[in-house]
Amino acid sequence: MADVAVRPHETRQTGAGEYAYQPGFGNEFASEAVQGALPAGRNSPQRAPLGLFAEQLSGTAFTQPRAVNRRTWVYRIMPSAAHPKFSRIGNGTLRGTPFDEIEPDPNRLRWDALPLPLADERVDWIDGLFTIAGNGDLSTRNGLAIHIYAANQDMTDRYFVDSDGELLLVPELNPIVLHTELGPLRVTPGEIAVVPRGIRFRVELPDGLARGYVCENFGAAFTLPERGPIGANGLANERDFLYAHASFEERGHTVQVVNKFGGNLWAADYDHSPLDVVAWHGNYAPYKYDTAKFMVIGSISFDHPDPSIFTVLTSQSESPGLANVDFVIFAPRWLVGENTFRPPWYHRNIMSEYMGLVRGTYDAKAEGFVPGGASLHNTFASHGPDAETYRHASTAELAPQKLDDTLAFMFESRWTIVPTGQAMSASWRQSDYDAVWSGLERRFR
Ligand SMILES: [Fe+2]
């Protein structure tokens, strides 16, 4: 089919390859890629400007309270209703709820990094998704799935939309560019991005290869945790969350839209790009955040607070303080506690903890927990520092110490996180993980 000239995106750039963004978590934004595309004074005029179609994208029920209500008005070249039937395609290594392939396993689990695609394989971001674990029920909007991606091909004429959940992306190896309906976001390791449920996007790999983690959140949309006595500032500050500017594509040939719906993949061939939004206004939009901007709060006397002090984003349940999933980071910080065992203490926890590592080392594990790898400590699994870390931390001289060049994170959930069969049988699972605690000795006298 003839390729009608694809108008380069109206991607706004501030120079030197930098994308421009609009700041402010949950703000009411307005953006137009072509001047005059946004109607003034009303959302749905009899004829939208420039021959565009007006469409509302609702991320919450119409009647939810203002504080959580999210919707965006888009002005697009074709209404998104203009598409043919979706048909089932293979799920590849993607899995959905229920996570019941194996019996829930009380053992502590750890994995090396997901192997990268070989040079002669063509794997885009969708095909590169590998589901590690999950919980809940996507049909009742509870729980989460944890995926890893490893890809070496751009999505050029292929788009993804997740009807089941919101996607929190944590790049580990190389940046990704998310071309979304509401504009592009370039996300580099150290940054994270959130694509709300139902928003179409494609992923480009500027370095030709990328790997990272994905939390697919079936529950309430991620929001910022309350600060309580911390006050009005600190942790992740609202102004540091960045949203895209309007940008659009025109495609004159057939493209494929892959829809994750009910845990399965469906696809339809479109005769236009679904990223054809010329202007938009609203508060339901993808965003990114640089974890280097996280104001880390910790003890300046003794002990250290519970790791909830490191929460960046939370998906709350109906019980106050009980998260469907929390996204928590272990970022560079000073340790100054006096007469304190400074790494994480030994603990057992009703909450379930999946941890990953973007770079550096994590202060509870001297070795074996590698960038791109992961550990899973489920409900009441006993864990904490490995023997080497304990030996060092319990005898070290307690001068002020900077933990630098490190970024670990945790997806922490109220429910047991059950691994998939493929994660349990993966060659890159560490079958001897328990051994990290085997060198601990009796010290009781
Ligand atoms: Fe833990």
Image: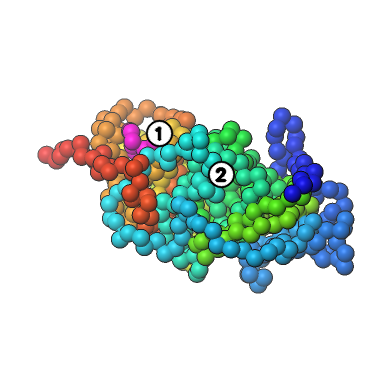
**Is residue 236 among the parts visible in the rendering?**
no
**Is residue 32 among the parts visible in the rendering?**
yes
In this view, 261 is above or below 4: below
x then y, percent, for residue 154: 61, 41
Mark 2, other Cα within 10 Å: few <14 / some 14–19 / many ≥20: many
Which residue matches tag 1?
A: 361
Q: Quadrant of residue 106?
A: bottom left
Q: Amino acid at mark 2?
A: Asp
Image position of 256 (left or right of 30) = left
Query: Dot 1: what SS?
Result: loop
x then y, percent, for residue 253: 73, 50
Query: Dot 2: what SS?
Result: loop
x then y, percent, for residue 429: 33, 43
Query: Which residue is painted at 31% across and 38% down in the image?
Result: 341
Q: Which mark is residue 250?
A: none
Query: Which residue is painted at 51% across and 61% down in the image?
Result: 264
Query: Which residue is painted at 33% across and 33% down in the image?
Result: 367
Tell me which numbered mark, 1 or 2, is placed earlier along the sequence.
2
Which residue matches tag 2?
A: 124
Magenta segment's dominant SS is loop
x then y, percent, for residue 381: 29, 53
CB of residue at label 2: within 8 Å of ligand 1?
Answer: no
Q: Amino acid at mark 1?
A: Thr
In this view, 199 is above or below 4: below
Query: Which residue is painted at 72% across and 65% down in the image?
Result: 81
User: What is the distance, in whole Å, between disc 1 and disc 2 at their CAs?
Assistant: 29 Å
Image quadrant in which the C terminus is located: top left
Image position of 409 (left or right of 223) = left
Mark 1, other Cα within 10 Å: few <14 / some 14–19 / many ≥20: many
The residue mark sitting in front, 1 or 2, is 2
Q: From which residue to which does the magenta span run? A: 364-370
